[in-house]
Image (cartoon, grey):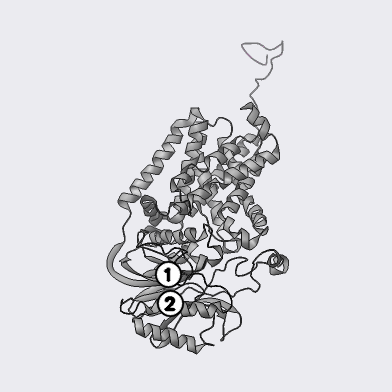
Amino acid sequence: MKRLDQWLASPWRRSALAALTGALPVFAFPAPSLWWFAYVALVPWILLVRSAPTGKRAAYDGWAGGFGFMVAVHHWLLPSLNVFIFVIGALLGALWAPWGWLVRRFLGGVPGPGRVLAALVVLPSGWLMVELVRSWQGLGGPWGLLGSSQWQVEPALRLASVGGVWLLSFLVVAVNVSVAVLVSVRESRVPAVAGIVATAAATSAAWVWSPRPDVDGRVRIAVVQPGVIDGVGSPEKRFDREEQLTRKLAGEKPDLIVWGESSVGFDLGDRPDLARRIAALSRETGADILVNVDARRSDKPGIYKSSVLVGPQGLTGDRYDKMRLVPFGEYIPFRSVLGWATDVGKAAGEDRHRGTEQVVMNVGHGLRIGPMVCFESAFPDMSRHLTQDGAEVLVAQSATSSFQQSWAPEQHASLAALRAAETGRPMVHATLTGVSAVYGASGERIGSWVRTSESRSVLYDIPLAHGVTPYVRYGDWPVHAALLILAAWCTAEGVRALRLRRPGPEPHVPPARTVRESPVRPGR
């Protein structure tokens, strides 16, 4: 132990170890998808931070660990962003500096049972605040939220229907804190065990009492995945391949056919010939077709990514313009300052334009769908609002062709399971190049994934469900609860600090007696 302390005395070695331990949770996400690892992945990081000699050093350990975490969960962006990914990791990693300070504040030294019990609610609340801030679209969005690692665990999906991915993150961090105390502070093992038992009890209660979706119908939705098509004339070749795959669905009686993001590289107002070909496919298959146009619009300036519905008679008029764009991939924030990113990576040469509102579309068979584009499926609030507006099926159109050999396609596809469980609505995740996936209203997988190596059309028989989940009804209440917990702790700390600074009452001193005073009759 003494040798380890001497080795960690170097700030650089300590920061490197913090970055390494902060990166460990990446293995809980797809593609490794070791979901159980999430419940202990933070323990080495917590143990390192609690051993920091000062609060300032603990904050640095939090920062370095946050850097490691952000780079690890976004490592697949390295070919596109190049060295810029490390700049982003350093900037966003700073969000964990206050969390590192909190870890040492509550777990440093030999914390008593009271301090450990407080840590079990304050530290997860602090983590939730980090996730909330970095979930802002301008900072990259909610990719890699810790709770989303539980996408294939049925009890966790039940919890998601109660409090969304935020509740899962809170409980996962609480378990990590409990385990860290169990292995490092023998005197406080009872409250640590109590934290694990409380988490198990909350999960069991959600399993028993939270309402389940009411299944009351079925719908047949087809996904068309053309695969990787590059080179000269790729937009035309991709359209031809999508046309071939869609034609194979004739006679299968689908209710809706979904193409992936950027499936049409031309504005259909400028290319009526393509609109007519899609309408012909709609007549042939008997289903409306939801395509995604990535092109400069003919009716207004700028490039948009838009979900466009085409029926047997042509364009139906239903259109959704993507609202939340990918930083650097689809626009460069503060381009006048950060425009140099185009010189070191594959950042957007021209900013895409944003839509202004979400749209629920009425498909020809009476089905109401809520479209999202690309990483919008990572935002819990977007699917929640679509559900509140009456969407019966959530649809995400995506393309991860630039990251085929990475963990990104699997991780992106897994997010739809959380959105389905949160809202109690089935979700279709349709991509150009995989992974395409469909999930039921409880987040369960329907059929098999269409992998990145495949080029085909697949028809899914999807149960429809109605009812309102607690998450849709009450929203991000775990975040609000975390804010109240942190506010209560700050208030208590402030009161405690005032008491320590306030001088106590002066001790009472009896008046002194002179030699002339009588002990029986004072003053004489």
Residue at the image point whose x is 51% and y is 85% from the top: 268
Q: Secondary structure at mark 2?
A: strand
- Amino acid type at circle 2 is Leu
What span is colored magenta in the figure?
Answer: 513-524
Of marks 2 and 1, which one's residue comes earlier in the chain?
2
Which quadrant of the figure contains the N terminus? top right
Q: Position of residue 490 (x, y in %)?
A: 57, 45
Observer able to see residue 264: no
Residue 353 in which image quadrant: bottom right
Residue occupying the point 64% across, 26% down: 2
Using the image as rendered, state which of residue 411 and residue 334 is in the foreground.
411
**Between residues 446 and 375, which one lies in front from this camera angle?**
446
Whether 448 is drawn above or below 197: the answer is below
Q: Is residue 365 above or below residue 396?
A: below
In the rendered image, residue 98, in percent from the top left (x then y), is placed at 61, 46
Taking the image as shown, residue 468 lies to the left or right of residue 269, namely left
Does 516 appear in magenta? yes
Secondary structure that dominates the magenta span: loop
Q: Residue at x 64, y 47 (%)?
A: 63
Q: Confirm or deny contact between disc 2 and disc 1 (CB under 8 A).
A: yes
Q: Of the residues shown, which amino acid type is indicated by label 1?
A: Val
- Mark 1 lies on residue: 395
User: As drawn, is 11 to the left or to the right of 38?
Assistant: right
On the image, the x and y values in percent for residue 218 come to 29, 69
Residue receiving disc 2: 290
Q: Position of residue 455 (x, y in %)?
A: 44, 70
Q: Residue 494: say if magenta.
A: no
Between 210 and 511, the one lying in front of the other is 210
